[in-house]
Every structure is written in C-alpha cells, then in structure tokens.
Amino acid sequence: AQSVTQLDSQVPVFEEAPVELRCNYSSSVSVYLFWYVQYPNQGLQLLLKYLSGSTLVKGINGFEAEFNKSQTSFHLRKPSVHISDTAEYFCAVSDRPGTYKYIFGTGTRLKVLA
Amino acid sequence: NAGVTQTPKFQVLKTGQSMTLQCAQDMNHNSMYWYRQDPGMGLRLIYYSASEGTTDKGEVPNGYNVSRLNKREFSLRLESAAPSQTSVYFCASSEGVSGRETQYFGPGTRLLVL
C-alpha cells in the first residue's frame, strides 16, 4: 500500500527566509501528488498538485514543488516566506489512480517568525 | 457558492451517546469523503462515497456508519460514542474518481467524547 512520509513535524523559519518542506512517498508505478495547506481552525485547501508532465509544479501563494521520481520525493519550497504562511502543510498521494483514496502525510507545522 | 459545509462546528458527547455529523456540498461533485484528524497522525479516511448510492470503508471505519442521502449530502453517524473518537472530523468532496481531482474540504467538526 502507498504511504507518505513527512519527516519534519515542525519547521520554524524567519520571515523572508526560504523554506523547504519535505515529502517522500513509497514507490509506485504511477502516482498523483498533492500539497494542501491548513490554516488554524480551517479545513484543508489545495496548494498545488502533480499529475504528469513538467516535474516543477507552481502553486498558489508563491509555493512550488518538484517531483523527483528516482528519489520518490515531492518537496515543497518557497523562496521567501511571510508571517501569513504560518500553517500546517500536508503532502498527499493518490493511491492507485481510480481507487478514489488519498493517503495523507502526518503534516508539517510551519511557523514563520518575525 | 458555499463549497462544503459541515454541522455542527463543535460537539461534546458522553460515552455511549449517539450523534450524526452532517455534510453538504454545492459543487455538483460525485465523490464525498469523511476523514478524522488526530495530532501526529494526519488525516485518516473513515468512509467515502464514489457516487450517489454507493459507500465504501476507508482506513478507520470501526464505530462509524455513513449515509449518502443524495448527491449533495453525506452524513457520518456515531452510534455509541467512545473517548477514542475524540477528534476533528472533516468532510471533503471531489468531482470524479480518477484520483487526479482536487479534494475540497469543509471547516471541520470538533468532537469531544467524555
């Protein structure tokens, strides 16, 4: 079965510094990958997703992620963070396209410091 | 468009009590999901409905039942609540069932079982 690992449970970073949130998934023939963000006391919303094609995916709020098939990774990056980026970030993988099941990682809490 | 709505927002139950969590979406989506979110465990799928009239178990279905009342509504029922069911519950929907679709989440129901 598919699995997703987010090794960093918390990442503190100063405002305007770059950040990378790591995500690794277990190997699969084909996979769709997602990053979602959850602001305090809200539901999740999509940041970006990789379905096929270019391995560099751009999303909302200046975030981007790179799909690396050989390393089975889908790390999320932002070159300069803002206080408003403080939130929890979840990586997710679609488990065998067509089964309607999404496997979520345990989340990384990004705290942006002034 | 309200998107995905959930009621209630908060609930406190005593062990053994029952309750139904309501979810509705106005995006004409075919698929709907129920997740629970616990600290350090990310989101875990309880039940999902690929289309109106069908429901299937997810990763953690024990102690729960669901009803896909129509295309818009998907309810989750706890017949006899247990403290282990203290959690935040999220409903989500998506257009289709290929695994490529974005999931749209409601704001969540925070449940405490005493």
Image (cartoon, coloured by chain):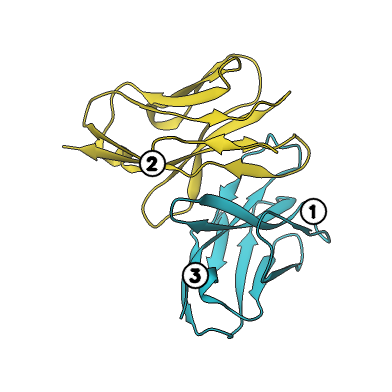
Pointer 3: residues within 10 angstroms few (<14), some, or many (20+)?
Answer: some
Q: Determine the chain carrying the residue at label 3.
A: B
Task: State whether discs 1 and 3 lie on one chain.
Answer: yes
B112 horizontally vs A53: left or right: left
User: Secondary structure beneath disc 1?
Assistant: loop
In percent of width and height, residue B36 lies at: 55, 59
**Which residue is denoted by mark 1 in the rendering?**
B51
B62 horizontally vs B86: left or right: right
Residue type for callout 3: Thr
Q: Could you tell me how far apart the alpha carbons at marks 2 and 1 are, in whole angstroms?
A: 35 Å
Q: In this view, does A73 lie above or below B18?
A: above
| Residue in the picture at 67% in, 68% down | B75
| Residue in the picture at 21% in, 31% down | A15
Task: Identify which residue, A45 or B38, lies in the foreground.
Answer: B38
B77 horizontally vs A78: left or right: right
**Which residue is denoted by mark 3 in the rendering?**
B86
User: Secondary structure beneath disc 2?
Assistant: loop
In percent of width and height, residue B71 lies at: 75, 59
Task: State whether discs 2 and 3 lie on one chain.
Answer: no
Residue type for callout 2: Ser
Task: Identify which residue, B35 or A61, lies in the foreground.
Answer: B35
Pointer 2: residues within 10 angstroms few (<14), some, or many (20+)?
Answer: some
A100 horizontally vs A53: left or right: right
Residues at badges 2 and 3 in contact (C-beta under 8 Å)? no
Q: Is residue B58 above or below residue B22?
A: above
Chain with yellow colouring: A
Which numbered circle lies on residue A81?
none
Chain with cyan colouring: B
The mark lying in front, picked from 2 and 1, is 2
Q: Could you tell me how far apart the alpha carbons at marks 2 and 3 are, in whole angstroms?
A: 22 Å
**Which residue is denoted by mark 2 in the rendering?**
A9
Q: In this view, does B51 lie above or below A91?
A: below
